[in-house]
Image: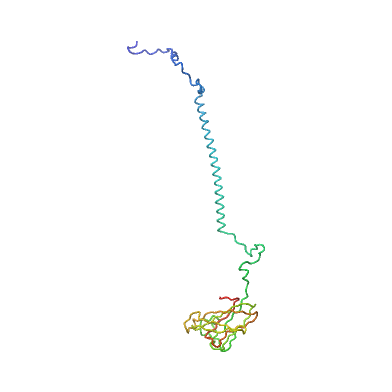
Amino acid sequence: PPKEGQQSAPQQGAPTAAYPQQQNAHYAAPENLPGGPPAGGGRRAAGGQGGGRGRGPNNKGLLIGAVAVVCAVAVGITVAVVTGGSGDDKQAAKDPAPSATASQGQGGEDDGKQSGDDASKEPQEELPKADAKTLQLSGGPSVASDVEGAKADGGSYVAGFNKPGAKLTWNVSVPKAGEYTVFLDYGVPGKDQQASLYVNGGDRRDLSLKNWAQAPEGDWKKGWTTSYVFTNLTKGTNAISFSCDEGDTCDANFDRVWLKAGHVTK
């Protein structure tokens, strides 16, 4: 028998059907409520619906990714074209194509023709030159070699020009009439000298024999220098005479003479 103050445990196998009868009459299962989830599948349906909402953003992400890839490819192609063109332009600037020349057979109507300055530079016949000792000497000049520095063959030159009537005549032939320059290598003893020049028996011309080498007075060895005279010659043989006339100062040695076409200074 139970002690005082303790309840007796229900007997095994006692009926429990009375408990459901105590539920609130207003309670209804969720599936029976308006808008409630279907019976037995509420959570799965909700999960499926949630999955549906998840697929929407995933599709949009894939679309954005595809667009990004296309844009990246387009940008890459554009950069390659731009940089590639710039590289070609720079390379072309560094290595320009060679211009056409007549020898390359290009240029249309100009094939085989020289242009510009080359057209005017026709091959010129070498004009005469001579050692002074080979000229016709008259009036006292003679060949000598005691002063060093002469450029003529053997270091010999013409001395004894320092008296009136002394003359050296150069008979020289030219291919055509025109302007020429007579060049003369000579030596003076550290002082300016003055002689005369005649061409084909014409009028007298001054022949300046200055001390261009700035040699000390009396120093023949350091007095070798060069001068020139402009003149006109006729086609064929011309007589050019270097003469010591009255009033000239002709203390000079003659080394070499030569001609150049035109009026030039060297």
In percent of width and height, residue 247 lies at 54, 87
Q: Nearer the viewer, residue 123 or 153?
A: 123
Q: Is residue 42 above or below residue 233?
A: above
Colour pattern: rainbow
**Quadrant occupied by the N terminus:** top left
The quadrant in which residue 200 appears is bottom right
- As drawn, the residue found furthest toward the left would be 4
Query: Number of numbered discs present?
Result: 0
**Quadrant occupied by the C terminus:** bottom right
Q: Is residue 142 above or below residue 9?
A: below
Q: Nearer the viewer, residue 223 or 205?
A: 205
Left or right, 249 with reference to 5 = right
In percent of width and height, residue 218 lies at 47, 84
In percent of width and height, residue 188 lies at 51, 83
The quadrant in which residue 5 appears is top left
- As drawn, the residue found furthest toward the top would be 1
In percent of width and height, residue 14 lies at 42, 12
Q: Is residue 13 above or below residue 193?
A: above
Q: Is residue 197 above or below residue 60?
A: below
